Amino acid sequence: MDHQSTHWADSDSFAVPPWIQPHSSTVPATGAWRPWDHPGQRRFMKTAMDRAFVLEGGGQLHDITIAFETWGTLNEDASNAVLVCHALTGDAHASGPAGDGHATPGWWDELIGKAKPLDTERWFVVCVNVLGGCQGSAGPASPLPDEPGFYGPHFPVVSIRDMVRTQARVADTLGIDKWHAVIGGSMGGMQALEWAVMYPERVQRLVAIATCTAASAQQIAWWSTGRRAIALDPKWRDGHYYDAAPGDGPHAGLALARQISQVTFRSDDVFTDRFGREPVEPLHGRFEMWQRFEVERYLDYHGIKLARRFDANSYLLLTKAMDLHDLGRGRGGMAAAIKRISAPVLSMGITSDILYPERQSRELADLVDQAGGSALYRQIDSPHGHDAFLIDIDQVAAALVPFLELSVDN
């Protein structure tokens, strides 16, 4: 359509034009990996076969699968094992190319691999898809273990602690009694912190990047807004959409949730420098409701991109787990929980992060110091906002590599 000569809707100026979104039939009802898909580089572990896996919030699961990937070789005494924990829409594919079974390249591919900062010729690196996720581990899109159909909305609410307990079972399966380091950013940082509190004897070094010890009111507000966007999509069907045809699932709600969060992942400076006030559809003398600026097209792109590779119900579950995150819950308060951490801590904050502000990473280091532990604080000076830990790899590596060489007693 020639936007300069033709108006989209002369009689109904609020009508949404077709160029804003791709044809819905091209978007699957769920972007989850399914057991009949190519496994890619995933490995799988079965657990809770003979007794139920009881969740922190009271739900139960049995006969569950956990997906993970590994890089490098575990040495004879299993002393070179490093656990990398993924963020909200990440998965076990932390390193490696896109291809069969993997819609995107590894989310930390520049950091993990041969001759890279986390050198897999030295380290045995493990990444586990979290419980409740949608890329091979048990989650809402998974088939029910003992009857036809999928979990859907019947999958119980999980916590960060539940995720860590399944990761501990993966470690047991691999013969890893103690991690040389546990590393994570954002939701991955929450997992790393819980590892150090739940299993202090199994963590020799802790690296927590752009994360928090407990979700703040504003963080809860951001994530809950995204959940409501999904719930208001009529094609979500209260979570029952796995048999829907392409285009008939809740991709619009999931895309909108992603658009909301994408705003928090980057900084105003980056948006301004990259997009400014440039329009997509020219402002040619007549203003119409759905003429877009370039930043809107950017958000449209990222929303649909996520809908093609993620699952709406998993998005609900994992953002809820992030809101529930509180190291002090049930442990006598935050100070008592932090005192359980015996590993030295590297806390990294990002100067332009509006989602998990730098002050929260500084507070973590201060809390560890106050509890008598050992903590280092390092700053990622970047305009890229929360996503800087995925972008400014050189700064992450500059702090991480020497920390991995730190001598420890535990």
Image (cartoon, rainbow, N blue to C red):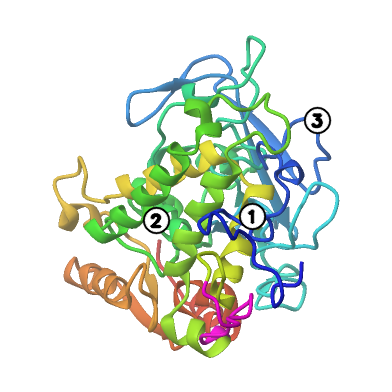
Indicate which disc, 3 or 1, sits on the residue closer to the N terminus: 3
| Residue in view at x 38 percent, y 73 percent | 347
Indicate which disc, 3 or 2, sits on the residue closer to the N terminus: 3
Query: Can residue 131 be seen?
Result: no
Quarter-wise, where is residue 381 in the image? bottom left
Indicate which disc, 2 or 1, sits on the residue closer to the N terminus: 2
Query: Hey, what amino acid is under mark 3?
Result: Trp
Label 3 close to label 1 by CB (< 8 Å): no
Query: Hey, what amino acid is under mark 2?
Result: Met
Q: Name the residue under label 1.
A: 304
The image shows a total of numbered marks equal to 3
For discs 3 and 1, the disc positioned in front in the rendered view: 1
Taken as a whole, is the magenta stretch helix, strand or loop?
A: loop
Q: Name the residue under label 3.
A: 36
For residue 284: magenta? yes
Above or below, 314 against 337 in this view is: above
Query: Can residue 35 be seen?
Result: yes
Name the disc covering residue 190, or none. Answer: 2
- As measured in the structure, the alpha-carbon distance from the residue carrying label 3 to the one carrying label 2 is 31 Å
| Residue in view at x 51 percent, y 27 percent | 237
Q: Is mark 2 on a helix, strand or loop?
A: helix
For discs 2 and 1, the disc positioned in front in the rendered view: 1
Asked if residue 166 lies left or right of residue 329, the reply is right
Numbered range of the magenta stretch: 275-287
Between 350 and 11, the one lying in front of the other is 11
Query: Which quadrant of the rendered structure holds the N terminus?
Result: bottom right
Q: How crowded is mark 1: few (under 14 residues within 10 Å), some or many (20 or more)?
A: many
Asked if residue 125 lies left or right of residue 381, the reply is right
- As measured in the structure, the alpha-carbon distance from the residue carrying label 3 to the one carrying label 1 is 23 Å
